[in-house]
Image: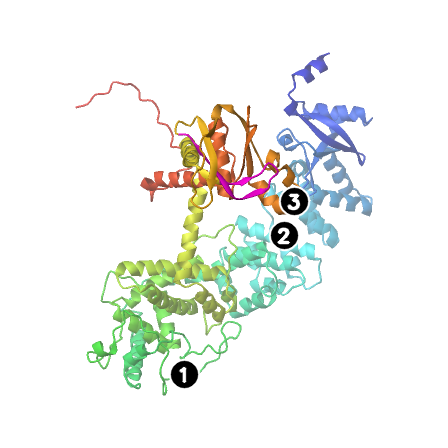
Amino acid sequence: MQKMQSEFHTSSKDIVSVAVEVASEKHLRKLNQNEPLSETVHSLCIEFNLSKDSGIYALQLMEQDTGDNKYVTEENRGEIKNGSILRLVLSPSEMVKQIIVRLGSEVSDIDGKLWALSKLSTLSGDPVFAKAFFTIDGYKIIKEMILNIAESHSNITYCLRSFIWLMHYQLVPTIEDEFVRRLIDFVNSEQHLPVELIKCSLVILEKVVQRKEHTMMTQVDVPDLIQHLWNRESPIIQEKALALINALAQGPDSLKILGSMASKQTRDTIQKNILCDDINPSMAHELYVYQSLILGLLEDRLTSMIDPLGTDAKYILELNSILESATEDTQNMKGSVFSLTEDSRPVTLLDKYLPAVMINKSFVNEDFVCSTPQPIKAVKKASYSRSKSTPTPSSDTKNLPKRHSLMIDFSSNSSILICRFTLECMLYFARRYRRTFVRVILEEKASSRSFPYTCERLVKLLSDLLGVGKSLKRDGKLYQPMVFTASSDCPFMEELFCHAALLLGRTRREMRARTPSDQEKVMLVVQRQLQEALALQPVTLEHLNEIFRRFPYSVIAEIWQSEIEEKEEWELTHLPPILELKKERCDTILELIQQQRINTLLRGAKFPKYTARGQRVKKKSWFVCLSTNQRSLHYGDCDDKNKLMLDCSSKIAVCSILTLVTGKKCPHVRDMRNRKADQDKIDLAFSIILDGEPRSLDFIAPDQQAFDYWTDGINCLLGNPMTSATKDSEFKMLLDLEVRLQLLDMDGISIPRKPPPVPKDPPNYNFCST
């Protein structure tokens, strides 16, 4: 009786239908979520004649996504839903006892030991079991097995898997030096060890480094880990080795490790063994971290300002010497310096008439020729496209000084702070692509812009896009293959700066920028162009230039416009304040559409005339309109030519209308149903059913819009809702326009998703004014 009363008071939401597996057989059961788990387990033990001690049993929930099982507790029993599969198994404490007995048995029971280790590595993923295992000093048992030299590699692998889970649940105390030394020996071993053993060792060592509590990790050398990057047959080993290298680079001996990571040999190893295959998301994250760490070496040079009169004076002198020499050579060309502006071809980094140097083919295209080592020889007409802001030859040629016309004065404006890396990029640009560098400076000086300041902004922009000096993102996966393929002669950041400088000039000409405010807009466009290009992960500089050509200013403007429209569309359909505003304006919009439909009936319309059997009467039509007082419909024959009513005496009262039918339900299209040629006419047919003579007023609309307008209008007269697709589209359009008009005053103001908190009541209401 008490059981029946408890079931009577139990809500149906607390009863779930599950399958309980006992001895590999599944049984359907109803599980009461309000009943303690101990009572549920006890009743199952009695039902299936198991041991009287029900405390040694527990329930496991099978996760359908992964197929794993986890113990059900009072805390997580809410995860049990209708259709879940439960298993009646030994409780965590009882399972731990059986495992410990088999692992500590003095008798050589190989099969029992293997079963215990296999169960241990599987069940350790469950936090309930892991805590129960750690409570009875299970951690010490597996640690001793790992340190035991006589133990087999397979048994050690099982122990390492369990050890990883114990570390995951923060159940492992301080790790001893001997244990770390054992794992390092596994990683550095020249023997052919199992892949899983090396993987587990790398994972544990990475966690040890991240905990920053062990000095033994200084004995791990990056070259010893790089050998695992050559293991193309095991991508998981490559990933874990790269993860350990990244972790070591963030430790106490980071400078030495970062120097090894940034070396050409190490980057070539990654390029040849990792980048050549498909990259999974976890490997992409490790490559992103690796890239961020080696690019972080530039941070000191990005934060250190130049000293024009001190240590950086020689670099500034060299830069101006290059400009001076280039000015003399350019003035000796056929014509003058400004004859360059007559050519309509775009600025490029291709100096075809200059001697080539050896360039890494995997990074730069073969035709990409630089101008570093030798002076300029006989030069033909250069490739240059004049900006409209560049002076014409006739205006400034006479005023051009013969020498030092392009020299850069770094001390002319004390408010401009130039970092040391910007100076290095400018010097690299001038050394490697001298003629192109001169052309860029010509355009900058013609537009009265400070070239060092422009370069500084460009360097800061590239650093921000690549995350130099920023904290690592947990979900970061964007890496640049060119970072790993760059050579010492062609460093990644310097080359990217040179191409970005040309992109800046081309974008400025596309936008016809002249004023300072225009220059700010140009930088925003260049930032988006670089962002789009880097997101596509170009492999070579040729590929990078191709991507730049795919994203001119016009394309960037289209992307921004589409993003604005998508944002507005999302706000109109998701933000609660806008949804409330829509709800308030719905009735007004519906009334507006209803009035428009009534006005359509008042204006009237001409319909083609058909016989009762659905035959078209040639040259005959009839006209129907609603009376001014909206109480009756007037109709009569109409001439097709002059559209005048011949007889308007016929009318029907609106109150006599019983209903409105459409399509095949209309009485005048019954004979059309079997004729395929008349199917479109059936879709446009509608009839007004009357309670007197005539029995109906039959229509076939000339088009879909007339059909929707008249059926909606008649429904409005009858007090029925409008059902046409035209009404839905017009309602959506008008409501959207109404909301946009209401939001015009909010332009530039972000609308919060949640309403602001209501302030607390004042302590009293004794307000006074002075």
Q: What element carries label 3?
A: loop
Residue 366: x and y in percent read: 50, 78
Tell me the element at label 1. loop
Q: Is residue 506 above or below residue 159?
A: below
Q: How crowded is mark 3: few (under 14 residues within 10 Å), some or many (20 or more)?
A: few
Give me the C-alpha separation between circle 3 and circle 1.
Answer: 81 Å
| Foreground of the two, 719 or 380 | 719
Whichever of labels 1 and 2 marks the residue nearer the N terminus, that label is: 2
Residue 620 lies within the magenta run: yes
Q: In this view, does 131 lie to the left or right of 268?
A: right
**Residue 354 has which mark?**
1
Secondary structure beneath disc 2?
helix
Circle 2 residue: 178
Q: Which amino acid does label 1 sit on?
A: Leu
Query: For the residues carrying marks 3 and 1, which lies nearer the camera in this image?
Result: 3
Q: Residue 112, which numbered label? A: none
In percent of width and height, residue 248 lies at 53, 57
Residue underneath mark 3: 675
With respect to residue 692, does 682 lie above or below?
Answer: below
Q: Nearer the viewer, residue 494 or 105?
A: 494
- Nearest the viewer among 199 and 731 is 731
Instruction: Provide the residue span drawn in magenta.
Output: 607-627
Where's the N terminus, which quadrant?
top right
Could you tell which of marks 2 and 3 lies nearer the N-terminus? 2
Residues packed near mark 2 inside 10 Å, few (<14), some (14 to 19) or many (20 plus)? few
In the picture, measured across the screen, residue 283 lies left or right of residue 417, that is right
Q: In which quarter of the image is residue 278?
A: bottom right
Q: Does the magenta stretch include residue 176?
A: no
What distance separates the C-alpha of mark 2 from that of mark 3?
Answer: 92 Å
Cα distance between the residues tagged 1 and 2 = 62 Å
Q: Is residue 750 left or right of residue 87?
A: left
Residue kind at label 2, given as amino acid type: Glu
